[in-house]
Image: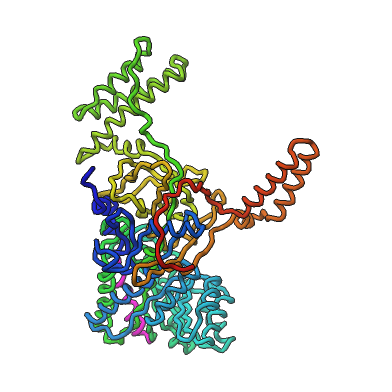
Amino acid sequence: MGNWSHLDAETLYNVPNWSGGFFAINRDGNVVVRPDGHAPVGAGAQDVPELDLFELIGQIRKRGVDAPILLRFNDILRGRVREIHHAFNTARREYGYTAPYRCVFPFKVNQQRHLVDVLVAEGERFDMGIEVGSKPELLAVMGQYAKKGLLLICNGYKDVDYVETALLTSRLGTHPVLVVEKASELTTILKAADELGIRPNIGIRTKLGGRGAGRWKDSGGDRSKFGLTTRQIVLMVEELENKDMLGCLELLHFHLGSQITRIRSIKNALGEATRTLTSLRALGAPIRFFDVGGGLGIDYDGSKTAFESSMNYSIQEYANDVVYQVKDACAEAGIEEPTILSESGRALTAHHAVLVSEVVGVSDFSSVGVPTATAPEEHDTIQNFAEVCAMVNAKNFQECYHDAIELRDEGMTLFNVGQLSLKDRSRIEEFFWRTCEKILRITRTLDYVPEELEHLERDMADTYYLNFSVFQSMPDAWAIRQLFPVLPLHRNAEEPTRRAVLADITCDSDGKLDRFIGLKDVKPALELHSLREGERYYLGFFLIGAYQEILGDLHNLFGDTHVVHVDINGGGRPQLSHFVAGDKVDEVLSYVEYFRSDLVASLRKQIELAIDEDRISLEDSGTLLKRFEAGLSSYTYLMLPEALNPAPHDLEGGGA
């Protein structure tokens, strides 16, 4: 224990492998963020800008903002824009690809305005485009970001209003491309274009025969939701040619699904898609954009494998394969190279957001302890259980487990028929859990754990309760069992001695995390520290910048958390560039048609009735009403007492 250091914590939580270099643990045991994701591990703030997250939370709290807090690091967003463009431009130079590459941000990944503002500003020098998939998304982008030269990819199902609005944005100088995803859309586009007198820019989404790899592999293949079959594509080309509008068909798009885990799937898809590209050119379609869609993955668990929460390739390998295969196909066909587009929204945004939450309570197994010695008058089942518990060792632990299960079931049967008292049943539980605890200690020393005992780590884990909602802040952890990195923001210079599952504060048994990234496999429990009286204990949830906010729901009416946008200056000092207050109770209630004025008026009536019936005093009625109105104006999450403040030292600098 005395030899533990922050480097051991980095290994335990696998930080170097999932963080992209943006996060590390410093010598004090605190998690730090680095805007330069390629800074050397172990470098200090004097070498590269870095910010201590535990200290940052202390500074934010002194400004009156409590956890849960979503931290957005704008520099990471900017860094990811640069990194993806650098990878593709490196590949273009290596393979002699003369046409440009342009990254396109899919708006659906995270529509929060201040985030998109940062991406658009950084992407301007790279001619980055924006993809929309619905009319509301189109209108948001049109109102906020429309400008001369903006490449606007219009996906999704389209009605007449959508199509006409997209076409009209071209009058602002933007370049909207209406991507046909089902055959009937072409008629709508051509009719609207004719009525408006606007020559449309048309794209086509091909339904590839091959599928991707990972959770979203069904986004590709013959039964995928979007895209045209080969026959439909040929008919569309013929229709455009007959109307003398084949010159409008300028984009070919395909999409294998989000978070593609296996590079081989990407290579196979590129082979099919580039063949479609060259064939369309041969038919006379001047395809100038080749859109490879999304799918560029994030290594959530740091394993660098084809596991569903990982990816077995790098950004550079992905870019190399895309550029090489398009280059090779065009060279073979003797055609001009198209501009390559990718809609890599997850890769752009996942790293930048960190949710910080605080432990509000613990239910642990340490209280089980050693059962007291049995008395002669106690039931034979209890006597037998005491013997089994005492004899557990490295040779017979599995046999003892079988005996413990049998004795527990026997005790339950005896209790149900009235032969054991409640105290007797309690004694059986004591011996059962003590036996399991001894067995678990043995299994932790083994290279191989018998399958029937694997669950003990989870079953014997503590439960740490945190002030957040899984359903609101990390819905994918609940809905699809997505793994996200989780670790303490501080105390990592100390060896963690507890193993825990995490529970949120919703009244739902699904509001928990019981799967965590490990060095070899998914872990059923997370290594954490024992709580200290009077001190706060913060955990950070990482890589949650893609999809989580917009998919989050209002289960138990827990609303959006506070959001703080952070920039880091050259000296490693934080600039809190923007603050978005979390939902208040009255705001959340209004979403389900309970309005503040109605609630207050109704309560006043109940108070007056209670006063008339002498059930409440005038003083108490005033206190109740004030408490009610204050509650309506409060944060939807728990407000913890100030006594828990660990008082981390403040930071110099900073704004907002």
The main secondary structure of the magenta stretch is helix
Tell which of 596 and 230 is nearer to you. Answer: 596
* Vertical arrangement, residue 509 with respect to residue 552, above or below: above
Q: Residue at x 38, y 20 (%)?
A: 410
Measured from the top left, where is residue 520 in percent x and y? 24, 49
Q: Residue at x 34, y 77 (%)?
A: 276
State which quadrant residue 36 falls in.
Answer: bottom left
- Judge whether residue 268 is colored magenta: yes
Horizontal side, residue 527 vs residue 592: left or right: left
* Vertical arrangement, residue 373 with respect to residue 614, above or below: above
Measured from the top left, where is residue 403 in percent x and y? 29, 23
Q: Residue at x 68, y 55 (%)?
A: 596
- Judge whether residue 323 is colored magenta: no
Measured from the top left, where is residue 488 in percent x and y? 36, 51
Horizontal side, residue 301 vs residue 136: left or right: left
* Vertical arrangement, residue 265 with respect to residue 279, above or below: above
Horizontal side, residue 364 vs residue 596: left or right: left
The N terminus lies in which quarter of the figure?
top left
Q: Which residues are magenta?
A: 265-284
State which quadrant residue 198 falls in.
Answer: bottom right
State which quadrant residue 597 falls in.
Answer: bottom right
Measured from the top left, where is residue 371 in percent x and y? 34, 23
Tell which of 156 and 564 is nearer to you. Answer: 564
Tell which of 643 and 391 is nearer to you. Answer: 643
Is residue 175 in sight in this rendering?
A: yes
Seen as rendered, the residue at the extreme top is: 377
